[in-house]
Amino acid sequence: MVAILVFFFTHWFLSLFFHTFFLHRYASHQMYTTGQKREKLFYFLTWFSQGSSYLVPRAYAVMHRMHHAFSDTERDPHSPHFFKDVWGMMLHTRKIYNAFLNNKLTVEKEFTEEYLPVWQKMDRIGDNMLVRIAFGIGYIAFYIYFAPSAWWFLLLPVHFLMGPVQGAIVNWCGHKYGYANFKNGDHSRNSEPWGIFLLGELFQNNHHKDGKSPNFAKRWFEWDPTYTVMKMMHVVGIIKLKPVRVRSNNHGLHQ
C-alpha cells in the first residue's frame, strides 16, 4: 500500500509541478526566462512526468492564452459555465486542443506571436500513441506488483489522464467555487487551502487579475508553492524571473 501511495502522489505532484511551472507559467505566459539547454530539460521532464497524458507545450499555451482572452465566454476553450458536467468540458477542451495541434484550427495572431517553446522531436515521441500506451502499461505493471487489492486499480485512470485531470480540476473548480479578491469580469475564484495543494493553480481569480505575475498568491494567508520554488531557482541562476508587480496595501480588492 505504501508503495502505491508514494507512486501516486509522486506522479501527481511531479506532473502538476511541470504542468504549472513549464506549460502554464513558461510556455503560456513567459513569466521567466532560461537558457536553451534548460528549456529542453524542462520540456523533457514535462513529458516524462505527464507520461501517457503528455500535453504538447505549443498547443497547450495557445489554448491557455485563448482562455485568458475569452475567460468564461462562449469562446473560452474550457469555461465550466457552458457545460452540464466536467466531462463535457474536458471533451470540448480536447477537441480544440487536437484541432490546433493538427493544424485544423487557425487562431488569431495574438495567440501565437509571443514566444512558444517548440521541440518537434520531443513532441513526436511524447504525442506518439505507442509511447502513451507504453507508459500506461508501466503504470499497470507497477500496480500489479505492489497493489494489495484490486480496489487500488481504480487510481489507474488518474495516472492515464493525469494532465487533463489536473487541468479539469483547476478550470472547473477555479471558475465555480471559492472567493474573489478582484472583479475581473469573469467567474474566476480562489480556493484555500486547495490553492496550496494544487501548487498555486487554484488561485484563479488572482491569476486572471494579472496573468503575467509569477506569484499567484496576493493576500497574507495565500501561498503559492510553485512561486517559492521558482524564487529559489532564480536565486541559484537556473531561471530568471520577470519582476512581480507591487501590490497596494488593500490588495486591490474588488477593483
Image (spheres, rainbow, N blue to C red):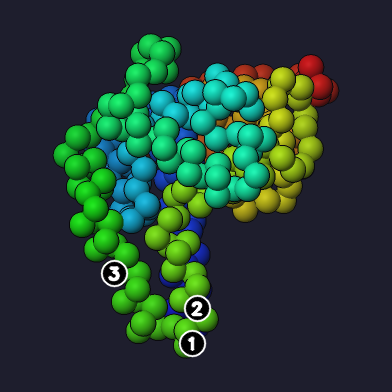
On-image quarter of the C terminus: top right
Kindly identify the amino acid type of the residue bearing the numbered disc 2. Trp
Task: Report how far apart the C-alphas of labels 2 and 3 lie in the structure.
Answer: 16 Å
Q: Residue at x 33, y 55 (%)?
A: 51
Image quadrant of residue 205? top right
In depth, the one of 149 and 203 nearer the eye is 149
Question: What element does badge 3 sit on?
Answer: helix
Query: What residue is shown with label 1?
Result: 149
Sequence order check, earlier mark of 3 and 1: 3
Sequence order check, earlier mark of 2 and 3: 3
Question: Which residue appears farthest toward the left when viewing the image?
Answer: 121
Image quadrant of residue 39? top left
- Looking at the picture, how far across and down is residue 52, in whole percent? 33, 56
Task: Report how far apart the C-alphas of labels 1 and 2 lie in the structure.
Answer: 6 Å
Kindly identify the amino acid type of the residue bearing the numbered disc 3. Ile
Side of 136 relative to 65 (left or right): left
Query: What residue is shown with label 3?
Result: 137
Question: What element does badge 2 sit on?
Answer: helix
Badge 3 density bin: few <14, some 14–19, many ≥20, Cα 10 Å: some
Badge 1 density bin: few <14, some 14–19, many ≥20, Cα 10 Å: few
Badge 2 density bin: few <14, some 14–19, many ≥20, Cα 10 Å: some
Q: Residue at x 36, y 82 (%)?
A: 144
Query: What residue is shown with label 2?
Result: 152
Does residue 70 lie above or below 153 as drawn?
above
- Looking at the picture, how far across and down is residue 132, in whole percent? 28, 56
Q: Given contact means CB atoms under 8 Å apart, are the residues at marks 1 and 2 in contact?
A: yes
- Looking at the picture, how far across and down is residue 48, in whole percent? 31, 53
- Looking at the picture, how far across and down is residue 50, in whole percent? 37, 52
Q: Which mark is residue 203?
A: none
**Is any atom of residue 176 visible in this view?**
yes
**Is any atom of residue 32 visible in this view?**
no
